[in-house]
Image (cartoon, rainbow, N blue to C red):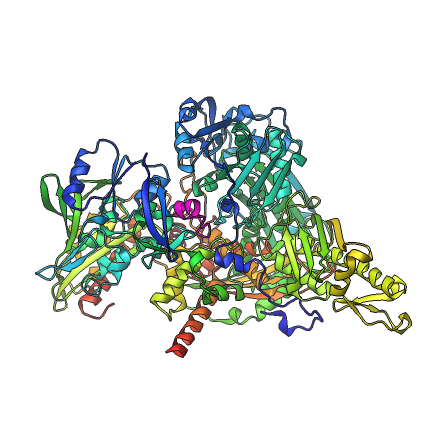
Amino acid sequence: MARDDVKTGYKLIGTRPNRPDGLDKVTGRARYGADFSLPGMLHAAVVRSPHAHARIVKIDASKALALDGVKAVVTRADLPTGLTGEDLNLQDNTLAGDTALYDGHAVAAVAASSALLAQDAARLIEVTYEVLPHVTDVDAAMAPGAPVIREGVADYSVPEGMHGNVARYMEFGHGDVEAGFAAADIVRAQTYRTEATHQGYIEPHACVGQMGEDGRGEMWVCTQGHWYIRRMCAAVLGIEAANLRVTPSEIGGGFGGKTTIFMEPLSLALSKKAGGRPVKLVMSRSEVLRATGPTASASMDVKLGMKTDGTITAGQVYFRMQGGAFRGMSPIGEALPCAFACYDIPALKHEAVEVIANRPKAAAYRAPGSPMAAFAVESLVDEMCRELKLDPIAVRLKNGATNGSKSSYGPVYNVIGLKETLEAAKAHPNYAIPLGPNQGRGVASGFWFNHGGETSVTLAVGEDGTATVMIGTPDIGGSRASIGLMVAETLGIPYENVRVNVVETGALGVNEPTHGSRATFASGKAAVEAARQAIAEMCRRAAADWGIDADAVEWKDGAAHPAGPNAGKHPPMTIGEIGSKMGSTGGPISGHHEVTAEGVGASFGTHVVDVEVDPETGRTTVLRYLVVQDAGTAIHPAYVEGQYQGGAAQGIGWALNEEYVYGADGRLQNPVFLDYRIPVASDLPMIDTVIIEVPNPGHPYGVRGVGETGITPPLPAVASAIAGATGARIRSLPCSPPKVLAAIKAART
Amino acid sequence: MSKIHVSTTVNGDPVEFLADPRETLLDALRNQLDLTGTKEGCGTGDCGACSVTVDGTLVCSCLMLAAEANGKRVETIEGMAREELHPLQRKFIEHAALQCGYCTPGILVAAKALLERNPDPTDTEVRYWLAGNLCRCTGYDKIIRAVQDAAAEMRQDHRGAA
Amino acid sequence: MRYHTPTSFADAAAIAAKATGTLRFLAGGTDVLVQMRAGMVQPDDLIDLKHIPGVDQIVQTPDGGWKIGIAVPGIVLGGHEGLVRDWPGVVEGMNLVGSTQVQGRATLAGNLCNGSPAADSVPGLIAAGAVVTVTGPNGSREMPVEAVPAGPGKTNLAKGEVISSITLPPRGNNGGDCYLRFIPRTEMDIAVVGCAVSLRLDGDKVAEARVALGAVAPTVILSEAAAQAIIGTVLDDAALAALAKAAEGAAKPISDKRGTKEFRIEVAGVLARRAARIACDRAKGMGK
């Protein structure tokens, strides 16, 4: 749905111009992480543990080093000691210390004159392991008798008596849940489970790193956040961050998984050891699936009390999540607040534990924690709606969070758009389409906080009246176009006259990654402020030229104008005229803005999905899918739609087919796209989208981040639709055909 | 290990290079010929990011040895635009049928091969033809629309030219 | 790795017989290259069979059958009018292997010799009664397709032997075949269960039938019991139920990451029923 029918008074915001990187991307010219080469470059390969848990007894690289063309081998012994906390976690994950903690954990790396030779050399590095007991399942990791896989992993939050694999504990709530349950007409409690999934970006991690004898280096890398990469690589290698310059390439998808480091420091360490020659390190797909950052697996208990009229009287959750073998990596801190964020419930109790397991170090995946929490809570809400024969949208409208309601996790909501999404879903033609045999409809709502974060932007006015904007948030969803639109709108110049560049770490102050759906919001907000600063300076130049006060000049339609008849008669001075003279009127004209951006607006969404299930095989076909979500203001509607559709597709994959499968030996059984099944083109229908716009007062153009909310509702909505189609409720994702068929048969008996 | 001399035509240009026997066509395109538009997404023929055509047939270049390209005619994304963009390329930009763009070269090459075989496919035919081209960003909706819009324009041009 | 391009099967067989290390044949490469990339196999010798004359040809045999060269890719099979008319079940099995891109390279011989229990082209070939010609250092012999697979990743070919062609018998009148597979997505998955049925009608009754089940045992099962369940019947509901039961009984699957044992057994029955119906419609000239 385009914005074109809504009167906003914006000239450019809400239109759909071509994105600036489009031409390069459709011609193959755009340069991604692995597309960069330097003279003298070597290629690297990584040796990885084939055991889920093992002591590393010995590493013998002599045969590898004896091969012609092999230039360097790096092991943990080459990295500095003395790190603590998350820096130590990062270093431990870059190269295992004395213990390999998961199948695929890096143990050594080698650089050679070709990629094939590097792989041959890697195979010649002999590692002696002493295999240790392992555990990979979240509940099994806490069960009595489960091996404690790391000593001392619990932090201050963990109560006495919990299993040694419990790393963190969290609880909060309000009101009297026992009274709330007592006041309900029905109280239901269920357990829901989700398995780990991977962000599934099509571009594997890739970097080219170069580091000289002086400890200064450069890196070209596909990343969502190059300042983070710089800081993390520096910490792991024991150098100063300022000694490292990181340039982001175009990025082939991230979804949170490229906000941190995995193997990047190895390219620098190898380069230094190889006499400063650049080293290219590209992960294979199986390395990506085994050894980057999938999301957590979760086991979740939910209890809800509901009256027959649909009023929810109390809610309680206890989530158990594992984020790999490192403390702090599971999203319990987000999952709990998200659990009831769509509701205004008088009594709530939240509890969660994070458990460690012999799995890779989890990273963020699009609204981390929110999809799992939504699967649990929204599924139970749906179960109770069906039991009481209530419409799922009506129940959400009845209990839904609104402007001014106190959120489930503490802050009071300012202006939000949940109810608008519910109303729009209810009114949409899809909601009225009659269902046939073996078909079912599911509804769910979802939430993401969104984020502001450290942001730094500079804008320069060109001699030709163009504006060049330097931002620090890599473009993963079209944010260059959206920021270009906002700057063009602010300056009153054509969109084509604005250039938005994502610049390297040496060119701007610190920027947090493109995460938390913040790029369009925060970089956009800062770009608008930078443009306003440039405008103020341009008005001063015009005022000086006209001999009037600077505050007697206003900016309109790309030019400085006298503000009112008292300012005198002066023809407008365009940005081009001011730009062409700036060298002699005071110098180059810029604007800049640095902020830890606040004023974030949450984005709520409601999804409706229709499925058909083959009752003889349990196979689910998605017939129709509708995303309704609040964007605040859709700066570029096509890219907002794209986020809605992309999030829905990932959620559908998570609901139906995607899962990490670990064998009894603790090894990942499906590290290839053949068996890690993401949706293919023939699996999905067209994905209908409705953009709701409840502008966020905290942003000059009303922007809310939109990238993350969309992956949340599909998990419960698809499971609920399957329940509608079959009478069988699946409480453990994915809803794979064997599970669905078994549930159908059980429901029949 | 001695290298194999490969003579082939890429995007209409005759090229020669020495290939390691184990080197794939994808590796050769990217590393020997600096044609980095074709991507590796999986190395196992599951994602289609490495799609090229060889003697007019759509293939995964990660599943061919460079040596097998000897004497063949290879077309990559870099050869798709002639004096101007191919309608598919234009429509992808117009319809916002790409986000990160990493799968885009493979999808464009695959879609072009489809439309050369079947100028008027149904949505279902387009989806099944492209099932081997994974996209993680778009959910495929705008991709299908862009392909159909390009197909319509190409049918129009063809009728106009006829 | 030594890369060979022999121009006759005799030469190919001779190279293979002399090879001492790890040897692989290369037709479409859609299995071998994947295995090389994954580090599962590092061939010392790779014999590319595509330079042998005739390997990319489909030729009708004097009795009306079809002789298929070992380098004919799936997409060419799928475009061959005669093959599609006579043996749609064989063609659709091959055409389900992988993506459009994989179809541009993958071959019947490669699919068969890779030895996956879930290979999509094999049940259809077996149900059709196809044979392969095997050429070795001592000449050529014929084997029914069902004699080739020896277990996961293994064939019954001796050292130095290579498949040199695949021959389908004449379809004859009133015959029809079909291959169905179960996968969780719509494409791009390995078969969780596969079933091919080839039958001939005499009037309304099934006069001959062959039922082959894939992905439910280490090698494809050619089930006599399942065939008997429908021979002599008009393929009514009772016959189809008996067929399903027989297929369930014949299936000997394992539980793995792609499906549970119970699920595979049940779906074997479902697919057998559905494939038989389609084969019957095709035999009557009704189906596509």
- Identify the image quadrant of the N terminus of chain C: top left
Q: Residue at x 18, y 43 (%)?
A: C162
Residue C42 is situated, as x and y percent measured from the top left of the image, at 32, 35
- Identify the image quadrant of the C terminus of chain C: bottom left
Give the side of residue C30 with respect to residue A196, left or right.
left
Residue B136 is situated, as x and y percent measured from the top left of the image, at 49, 53
Q: How many marks?
A: 0
What range is drawn magenta here? B26-43
Residue A626 is situated, as x and y percent measured from the top left of the image, at 53, 64
Say if residue B109 shows up in the picture: yes
Dividing the picture into quarters, in which one does residue B73 lie? bottom left
Residue farthest right in this picture: A566
Q: Taken as a whole, is the magenta stretch helix, strand or loop? A: loop
Up-down relation of residue A263 to residue A615 (above or below): above
Would residue C88 be counted in the magenta stretch?
A: no
Say if residue A398 shows up in the picture: no
Residue farthest front in this picture: A584
Q: Residue at x 74, y 69 (%)?
A: A557
Up-down relation of residue B132 to residue A214 (above or below): below
Give the side of residue A565 with respect to residue A174, left or right.
right
Q: Nearer the viewer, residue A177 or A262?
A: A262
Would residue B27 be counted in the magenta stretch?
A: yes
Q: Nearer the viewer, residue A424 or A75?
A: A75
Residue A734 is situated, as x and y percent measured from the top left of the image, at 45, 50
Q: Nearer the viewer, residue A280 or C211?
A: A280
Q: Residue at x 65, y 34 (%)?
A: A243
Residue farthest top in this picture: A57
Dividing the picture into quarters, in which one does residue A125 lie? top left
